Image: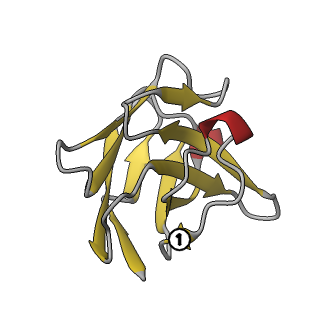
């Protein structure tokens, strides 16, 4: 099993920045795809950004140019640098991972999930 733990959420004013981290532990060999999702109150969980073991990245249109996803060299920790935050970025942010390369499938069907970290952007 793989355990994922998110951190770095909090309250920030619009225009500010936050950096989220996702630490993977357990049976983490051969983790290929990692991604950040978010779920706002009353809405579905949506992909924010994804990254493969080959460092290929994808972003939702709503965050392009503002958010940056990255992984450390060991691939065990993933980050999401969020700049120019807007009120509509308020959500619970979830980390997800899979041993398959799911980039071509839109990061759908991720096997492992964290419990989430709340990001609140005040306007």
Q: Where is residue 5 in the image (x, y as percent from the top left)?
A: 35, 72
Residue at 50% x, 47% y: name it: 121
Chosen colour scheme: secondary structure
Q: Position of residue 2 (x, y in %)?
A: 40, 76
Residue at 26% x, 55% y: name it: 77
Label 1: few (<14), some or many (≥20) within 10 Å?
A: some
Residue at 61% x, 54% y: name it: 38
Q: How many labels does the image show?
A: 1
Of residue 30 and residue 117, the one placed in the foreground of this image is: 30
Q: Is residue 21 above or below residue 68?
A: below
Q: Where is residue 22 in the image (x, y as percent from the top left)?
A: 33, 60
Q: Give the left or right position of residue 20, taking residue 89 as reference.
A: left
Q: Name the residue under label 1.
A: 112
Among the 4 quarters of the image, the one containing residue 58: top right
From the image, which quarter does the N terminus lie in?
bottom left
Q: Position of residue 48 (x, y in %)?
A: 59, 41
Q: In this view, does 111 lie above or below 18?
A: below
Q: In this view, does 9 lie above or below 116?
A: above
């Amino acid at each position: 099993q793989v355990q994922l733990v998110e951190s770095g959420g909090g309250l920030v004013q619009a225009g500010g920045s936050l950096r989220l981290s996702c630490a993977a532990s357990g049976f983490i060999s051969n983790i290929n795809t990692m991604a950040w999702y978010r779920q706002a109150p009353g809405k579905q969980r949506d992909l924010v950004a994804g990254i493969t073991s080959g460092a290929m990245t994808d972003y939702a249109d709503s965050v392009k140019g503002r958010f940056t996803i990255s992984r450390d060299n060991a691939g065990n920790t993933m980050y999401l640098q969020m700049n120019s935050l807007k009120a509509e970025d308020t959500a619970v942010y979830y980390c997800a991972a899979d041993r398959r390369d799911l980039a071509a499938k839109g990061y759908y069907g991720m096997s492992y999930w964290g419990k989430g970290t709340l990001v609140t952007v005040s306007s």
